[in-house]
Amino acid sequence: MTAAPPAAPPAKRRRPHPWVLWTALAIAAVIFLYPFVWLVSASLKPRPQVFDNRLVPSDWAPENYTAIWTAAPVWTWLFNSVVVALAAAAAVTISSAIVAFGFAYFRFPGRNVLFALVVGTMMLPGAVTMIPTYLIWNELGLAATQVPLWAGNLFGSAFYIFLIRQFFLGLPRELFEAARVDGAGYWRLFWRIAVPLCRPALIVAFVFELRASWSDLLKPLIYLRDPALFTMPRGMKAILDQFGQAGEARWEIVLAGAVITTVPMIIAFFLCQRYFVEGVATQARKG
């Protein structure tokens, strides 16, 4: 019998040339950056030139920013937003991490069913619980305060529980067993072993919730009545009502307020960029 001819080597996949990737990335960057660049440019223009679509203003009007600081208590709104966003992000990160550790570490009957129920709550629209939640806070006498904007996060979030649990499941169980032999309790396992090893996941959850809380308008619209308690999105709604609805809308001031609202999140992302990208990349490799 004649031997079968050797199998042909698999064809190598041709990778695109680096300049193709760089060109595609450059085009995508321009598409994503253009709205923000236009926003900054329009906020520095006088009223007749706001919508002329020039990225470099022919006439500069930096007094737009002075006008908005004078017309509204922006410092107070920024401070309120920082406090609420940090409280909401810290509360949901810590509470979700504790629940996620419980689902990842402990073995008990019905664990998978209970976890499926927790994840299933993500399919529940927020509008379904909006009125019952308001009635609860109103009964507690906190409906007109900033507490409802962040205190609900003390009970965790199904999305963040799922995200952090996947990181905890990737940790070697031998680490926890060795610590248990040395007399470590469950809280020490969580705080001294699980949290440091899964710091990127916790930072991703923190940054996600920080952005979500910072840009949230619905809750402040429902609960806040006192302008001294407004967050920046709620304050921007007041600015829009004041300067954007009249016969001669002063859009340059509204856009200046939008820039002030946007910049802090850009700074926060750059400060946490390393951990944010690391967490997303780690989760992608596990997936």
Image (tube, rainbow, N blue to C red):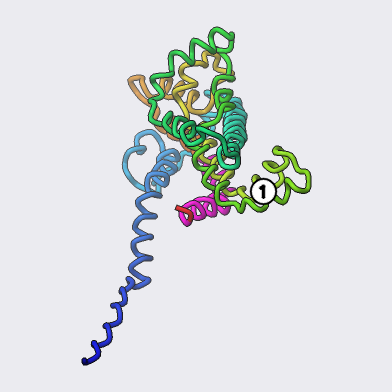
10 Å neighbourhood of mark 1: few (<14), some, or many (≥20)? few
Answer with left or right where residue 36 lies relative to residue 167: left
Image quadrant for the N terminus? bottom left
Q: Residue 193, how many percent across, how many down?
A: 68, 48
- At a point 42% along the width and 47% down the height, the residue shown is 37
Seen from the viewer's position, the closer of residues 217 and 64 is 217
Task: Give the residue type at disc 1.
Answer: Pro
In which quarter of the view is residue 120 placed?
A: top left
Answer with left or right where residue 251 lies relative to residue 137: left
Seen from the viewer's position, the closer of residues 282 and 170 is 170
In what element is the residue under mark 1? helix
Report the span colored magenta: 263-285
Q: Residue 55, how many percent across, how many down?
A: 38, 48
Query: Residue most toward the left?
Result: 1
Position above or below: 247 against 186: above
Q: Is residue 271 magenta?
A: yes
